[in-house]
Amino acid sequence: MQMVVYSLLSALGLGFLGWLWWRILKRSEDPAKFVFKSSLTAVLVLGEIVLIHSLGGNLKESSGLNLGNFGNAAIIAGSIGVLGVVLSIIWTSEISAVLFSPLTNLFDGGNQPPEPKPFYSIAQARRKMRKPLEAIMLIREQLERFPDDFEGVMLLAKIQAEDLNDLPGAEITLNHFCNSPCAPERQVVAAYTQLADWHLKKTADVDSAREALRKIVEHFPETEFALRAEQRIAHLAETDKLILAQHSRQPIPVPEGVKNIGLLDSTEFLRPKEIEPRNLAAVYVTHLEQHPHDSEVREKLATIYARDFKRLDMATLELEQLINEPRHTPKQIAGWLNLLATFQVELGADVATVVTTLEIIVERFPDLPVADAARSRLARVNLEFKGKQATPNVKLGVYEQNIGLKYGPPRKD
């Protein structure tokens, strides 16, 4: 039974040593050198075992003390010492690597291979040398290994659109990337936004730019990305007018200037007439019916209601639509709440109403800088109301004129 246990333990030990040897071999920088050192070590250790066995047997057979026993013992001790020195020389580098590798790996990364990533420096150099086709070939070689690399896709589309004037090809490249299920949201939004910019800049095609932005809304509905795309779509009509004006060749009549302008008593009639607030508000309302997410126009409409028509209720309704939109950023929402509080102060609301409006900022964004600004304004809200109070007129007395021009004591008549 004891022999079975010894045999089992020996087998387990040899198996562990074999597994450890194979693991070290796989991680070795020079496997052939490691195999040679292992073979040499095995030969030396087996030779030492044979030597000890032969000389140790003579020690057991002889009885008493004699010079032969001392000689054999000295040979065994010396051979073991020499073997230790030789093995230390052979395995010093491996042993030191095992002991100090946890510390050195902190600085040099250890034996882990660097993370593979694409390189576009050569392709960019070819592009600067005005060799776009060679650059495209190099980029495609990298994209074969890294098909989802956004940097390479955008560089390829940029060369197609800007260097080769192949906007349809660039659109195909970006659409192929954006239709991939593993494409990140922000990269898809950036690709479609860049495509819209190219349609406006290269071909002045507002419809194609609008279609590229609508894809953002379709891909990511009810998100901040969709809200920004909708707001930009709302302003494409103005961009279309600017493009048409730039490409229009019709002569623009210029009225004759006013003669002898320096001799006129007044030049008020020369100032351009401002648009009536009622007409401007009607334009904004019509625009918002078509583009309800245009926050810039809605804020302007609320300002007209408050400043020109003194209608705090209508201004509040417009600003509340902006404030209650969850896709807006905290900074925007806090800005509209502060604007509403300003309108409330100007149009006669009580202090409690203004305080309630400002406290919404603190409740919704307690850990952001906008909450600190709201707390500061809450501390001085009473001063805002005092500043809006009318200053009483003070009737001044009648004083002698030119008193500052006199000097000396008054003369007695």
Image (cartoon, grey):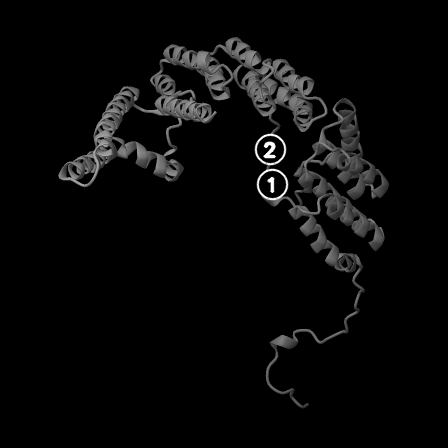
Whole-percent x, y for residue 21 in the image: 36, 24
- Residue labelled with disc 2: 257
**Is 273 left or right of 169, judged from the image as shown?**
right
- What kind of residue is marked 2? Gly
Residues tagged 2 and 1 counted as in contact (Cβ below 8 A):
yes
In the image: residue 363, left or right of residue 192: right
State the image quarter where residue 121 is shown.
top left
Q: Residues within 10 Å of mark 1 (few under 14, many from 20)?
A: few
The residue that mark 1 highlights is 261
Can residue 22 be seen here? yes
* Foreground pick, 283 / 47: 47
Instruction: Please state the horizontal and vertical placement of residue 356, each as a whole percent of the image.
Output: 81, 49
Question: In terms of image quadrants, where is residue 81?
Answer: top left
Secondary structure, mark 2, is loop
- Horizontal and vertical percent for residue 69? 18, 37
The residue lying at 48 percent from left, 24 percent from top is 1
**Amino acid at the residue labelled 1:** Ile
Looking at this view, name the residue that lies furthest to the front.
Answer: 63
Residue at screen point 60% across, 33% down: 257
**Residue at point 45%, 11% (across, down):** 144
Residue 348: tell me if it is visible. no
Vertical placement of 304 versus 20: above or below? below
List the single residue furthest toward the bottom. Answer: 412
